[in-house]
Amino acid sequence: MSRILIVEDNELSRDMLSRRLAKRGYEIVIAAHGQEGVEKAAADSPDLILMDLAMPVLDGWEATRRIKSERSTASIPVIGLSAHAMADDEERARRVGCDDFDTKPVELPRLLGKIEALLRRPEP
C-alpha cells in the first residue's frame, strides 16, 4: 500500500482528500502546514506528497524546496496543489521541485491519474 502525505492547511480539504484517497487503498499521513510537511516527509518516508502551495507557517513553495534539497527526501514525488492557479504557477512549482501540478478544487480522476503515474515512475 502506498503512503501519501497530504500537506494542507484547510481542514475540510484535508479531510475530503484523505477520505477519498483512503477509500482507494492509500495510507494517508497528514500535515497542517509546510513545516510539519517537511518534518513528516523525513520521519514517515511517504511514497508521494500532495503539497498545498499557499499555507501559513511555511508555504508549500519553500516546503517543497526544502524536501527536494535533502538527500533523504529528494526522490519523493511531489504534486503541487493551488486554488490560485495563475499562468506561471505550474512553471514556478516545477522550479522549486514539484514533479507535477494540479488545481483546486481537486478533480479526483485527474489527480488520481497523476498520483498513479508518479508512483509507477522508476526511481532515478
Image (cartoon, rainbow, N blue to C red):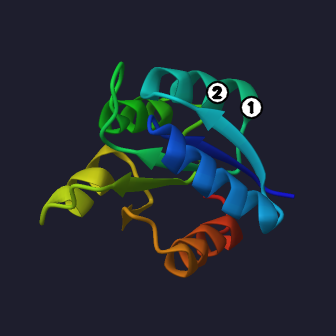
Residue 72 visible in the displayed image: no
Above/below status of 70 relative to 117 = above
Residue 47 x/y as whole percent: 70, 50
Nearest the eye: 110 or 62: 110
What amino acid is labelled 2 in the image? Answer: Lys
Residue 71 x, y percent position in the rendering = 57, 31
Q: Is residue 112 left or right of residue 69?
A: right
The disc at residue 44 is 1
Q: How far across and how far down the image is residue 106, in percent?
A: 45, 66
What residue lies at 26% left-to-right and 62% top-to-bottom?
A: 90
Count up the numbered dots.
2
* Vertical arrangement, residue 97 with respect to residue 58, above or below: below
SS of the residue at dot 2? helix
Say which quarter of the image contains residue 123. bottom right
| Residue at the (45%, 39%) spot, across then down | 10
* Residue 19 showing in the rendered view: yes
Q: Is residue 99 above or below residue 108?
A: above
Amino acid under label 1?
Answer: Asp
Q: Which residue is mark 2?
A: 40
**Left or right: 70 with respect to 28?**
left
Residue at figure coordinates x 29%, y 52% from the top left:
93
Q: Which mark is residue 77?
A: none
Q: Where residue 9 appears, x then y in whole percent? A: 45, 34
Q: Is residue 62 above or below residue 103?
A: above
Confirm or deny contact between disc 1 and disc 2 (CB under 8 A): yes
Name the side, left or right, on which 58 lies relative to 40. Answer: left
How much space separates mark 1 and mark 2, taking CA atoms? Answer: 5 Å
Tell me the crowding category of disc 1: few under 14, some 14 to 19, or many 20 or more residues within 10 angstroms, Cα based: few
**Mark 1: secondary structure:** helix
| CA neighbours of label 2 inside 10 A, class few (<14), some (14 to 19), many (20+) | some
